[in-house]
Amino acid sequence: MTLEQLRIFIAVAERLHFTQAAQALGLTQSAVSAAIGALESRYAVDLFHRVGRHVELSAAGAAFLTEARDVLAAAAHAEATFDDLAGLRRGRLALMGSQTIATYWLPPRLLAFRNACPGIAVDLSIGNTRQVAEAVAAGTVELGFVEGDIDNPVLERTAVDDDRLVLVVGRPYAWAGDQALGPDEFRRLPWILREPGSGTRAATEALLATRGLELGDVSVVLELPSNEAVRTAVEAGAGASVLSLMVVSTGLKAGMLTAAACALPTRRFSRLRHRERRLGGGARAFVSALKETPAP
């Protein structure tokens, strides 16, 4: 059993989806399937139930998930100790970001950190806000970056930046850019959403609430697991969605998307860490680097 197999198992268990786990870890789906298969074969136990096109965590898998998280947390603590002994000459930093942050906000800052501390290897995984918070709480990553609200007393949350949200529509619904949108207009629009647990989905629910609406009051035609999938669906004319300006700026400039006449509040990007765990040297250096890195 290897730490990499444990990381892969945890990623699948948290998402109950092999493809999404592979994307979050930067691996192929076949590599993820092979790692899970090796664990199940080696210990003669089914960690997941394959139900049609879906997977469910088995009783054995649920029990093993707690142990796997504890092992990775202990390994991360040991690695942080060695990192401290080595200074910043070498080490490893495990981060996790929600999709908007990991795809658009973190990369230039990781590049600046890499140039400043080339001996620190960075492992970046991607999830939604809920998954990032769970990973930081479990100790599988040292730092998390989210845009959604979290309510976990063991996590310390620090604001790092602001993000502008936009309600966008495709060409068939361009009329939404020319008139004020009230409850009736929201009901006329088909909506494309991110999955439950996503900060972007929570922002959509908050917007609907300003019109006295809930998700059940509007037509939700698609729920998709990534910002890019949502944006592509909206560009294809599927309906409306709330997304970060960083995600939709190219589509707006190209005329593939229209910004609806609807003001949304700025949301906060936040850094998460565990209140009771000591950060390793690499994590502390990255926190310091964030304060010094100018916005791209």
Image: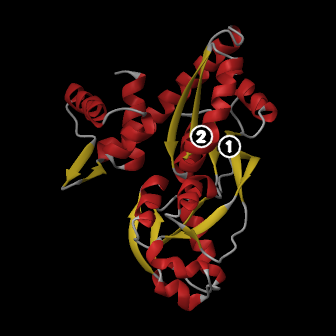
Res 288 quadrant in image:
top right
In the image, residue 68 sits, relative to residue 191, either above or below, namely: above
Image quadrant in which you'd find residue 286? top right
Specify the color scheme: secondary structure
Name the residue beneath numbered marker 1. Answer: 272
Q: Is residue 220 left or right of residue 18?
A: right
Q: Nearer the viewer, residue 97 or 192?
A: 192
* Type of amino acid under label 2: Val
- Report the number of numbered marks: 2
Asked if 183 appears above or below 29 in the picture, the reply is: below
Q: Secondary structure at mark 1?
A: strand
Do residues under tags 1 and 2 come within 8 Å of each other at their CB atoms?
yes
Q: For mark 2, what is the residue?
A: 136
Pointer 2 local density, CA inside 10 Å: few below 14, some 14–19, many at least 20:
many
Kindly report the distance in space between the C-alpha atoms of the residues bearing marks 1 and 2: 7 Å
Q: Is residue 247 left or right of residue 19?
A: right
Marking on residue 109? none
Q: Position of residue 150 (x, y in %)?
A: 64, 56
Give percent across and percent down for residue 232.
42, 59
Q: Nearer the viewer, residue 272 or 137?
A: 272
